[in-house]
Image (spheres, rainbow, N blue to C red):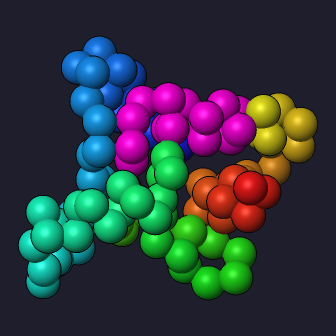
């Protein structure tokens, strides 16, 4: 989860928008430029790869801006505090799915 906070801060510091995050084992077989307008149109804020009924994965992730990511990381932190996560491990993949389905 910490990496999302780092990415959020990096985007905010640089004023970057419309960013893609990939895991190191992901290969793309299409032009991101060709589909960029589709991501902007269909996904307000974030798009994250589904990983089944209870998880999402960041193998491929579209981030509109730093605030989009901040909304998700704030949700993570609030959820972890609410669940008293110090006593229980909560995987980030489950937190992402919970965040995505709450909208």
Tell me if 25 is positioned left or right of 51 in this view: left
Along the viewing direction, whichever of 5 and 89 lies nearer the viewer = 5
- Asked whether residue 86 is drawn in magenta, I would say no
- Residue 66 x, y percent position in the rendering: 42, 30
Q: Residue at x 49, y 38 (%)?
A: 69
Q: Is residue 47 visible?
A: no
Using the rendered view, name the quadrant where residue 85 is placed.
Answer: top right
Q: Quadrant of the C terminus?
A: bottom right
- Above/below status of 20 relative to 50: above
The x and y percentages for residue 101 are 73, 64
Residue drawn at (40%, 60%), measured in percent from left and top? 41
Q: Main secondary structure of the magenta part?
A: helix
Between 71 and 41, the residue placed more toward the observer is: 41
Give the number of marks. Answer: 0
Membership of 65 in magenta stretch: yes
> Does residue 46 appear to the left or right of 25 in the view shown?
right
Residue 69 seen: yes
Q: Where does the magenta region start and end?
A: 63-77
Task: Name the one closer to the observer, 60 or 62.
Answer: 62
Residue 83, x across and y down, in percent: 88, 43
Residue 73, quarter of the rendered image: top right
Q: Residue at x 47, y 59 (%)?
A: 43
> Which of the 4 image quarters holds residue 61?
bottom left
């Amino acid at each position: 989860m910490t990496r999302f906070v780092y990415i959020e801060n990096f985007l905010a510091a640089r004023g970057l928008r419309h960013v893609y995050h990939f895991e190191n084992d992901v290969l793309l077989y299409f032009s991101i430029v060709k589909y960029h307008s589709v991501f902007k149109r269909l996904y307000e804020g974030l798009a994250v790869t589904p990983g089944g009924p209870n998880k999402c994965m960041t193998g491929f992730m579209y981030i509109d801006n730093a605030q989009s990511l901040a909304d998700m990381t704030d949700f993570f932190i609030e959820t972890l505090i609410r669940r008293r996560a110090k006593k229980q491990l909560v995987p980030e993949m489950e937190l992402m799915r919970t965040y995505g389905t709450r909208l």
